[in-house]
Amino acid sequence: MVNDHTSATLSVGHRDSVLNERLSKGLDEVNFPATGTTAADQGGLSVKVVDDADELIGGLSAWTWGGLLGIEMLWVREESRGDGWGSELLLAAEKEARRRGCDRACVSSFTFQAPAFYRRHGYVETGRTLGIPGGAEDVHMYKKLA
C-alpha cells in the first residue's frame, strides 16, 4: 500500500539543527522506555589539553548514556603526537565516565586513523562499516570499563 502524500512536502537540504533536535526528541521518546533510561542518564563530555600559550594540543568529545561512554572524536595536533596526549585524553574521559556510572565504552575509527591506538587501550573490534572514501573501513570498537 502506498501512502497518500497529497498533503505532505518532502524537502532535501543541508544539515538542519532544528530538525536534528526534533529527531533526537522523537527518538528519545522511543529509546527511553525501550532501554529503561531517562534524559538524566545522558550527557555530553569533553576533555582538552592546552599549552602555555593557551593553544589547543588536543581534545576528546564524547557522550554518556545509560552506563555507556560513546567517544565521538579524539584529536591531537600533529607536532604533539607521540607525546602521550592521546592516552591522557582517553584515560581522563574513561575516568569521568566511570564517575558517571559507566561500565563500558564504544568508539569507531577509520582504518587510516587510530584502531591500533584503541586496541592498545583495551578496546576490541566488534564490526566494520565498508565503503569509506579512499578504500578505508570504519572500525567499531568496545571496551568494558569496570
Image (cartoon, rainbow, N blue to C red):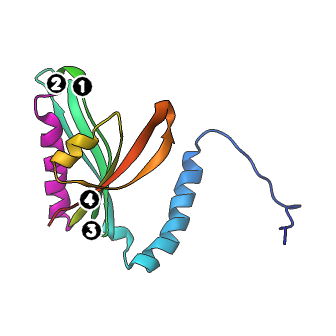
> Mark 1: which amino acid?
Arg
Q: Residue shown at 35%/33% (left/top)?
A: 112
Depth check, front residue: 133 or 3: 133
* Crowd around label 1: few <14 · some 14–19 · many ≥20 (10 Å): few
Q: Earlier in the sequence, mark 4 or mark 3?
A: 3
User: What amino acid type should be assigned to the residue bearing mark 2?
Assistant: Ser
Which residue is located at x 74 percent, y 47 percent? Answer: 11
Q: Is residue 26 left or right of residue 74?
A: right
Q: Is residue 85 magenta?
A: yes
- Residue 80's tag is 2
Residue in view at x 20 percent, y 23 percent: 55
Q: Which mark is residue 77?
A: 1
Q: Which residue is mark 3?
A: 67
Q: Nearer the viewer, mark 4 or mark 3?
A: 4
| C-alpha span from label 4 to label 3 | 9 Å
Relative to 71, is 32 on the left or the right?
A: right
45 versus 31 height, above or below: above
- Dominant secondary-structure state across the stretch colored magenta: helix
Are circles 1 and 3 on residues that touch, CB within 8 Å? no
- Tell me if label 1 and label 2 are in contact, CB under 8 Å: yes
* Placement of the N terminus among the 4 image quadrants: bottom right
Q: Could you classify mark 3 by the number of other residues whose Cα lies within 10 Å: few (under 14), some (14-19), or many (20 or more)? A: some
Which residue carries the number 4 mark? 105
How many marks are shown on the rendered structure?
4
Is the Cβ of the residue at disc 4 closer than 8 Å to that at disc 1? no
Q: CA gap, disc 3 to disc 2?
A: 32 Å
Residue type highlighted by circle 4 = Ala
Where is 127 relative to 68, above or below?
above
Magenta residues?
82-101
Query: How far apart are the two marked residues, 2 and 4, measured between alpha carbons?
Result: 25 Å
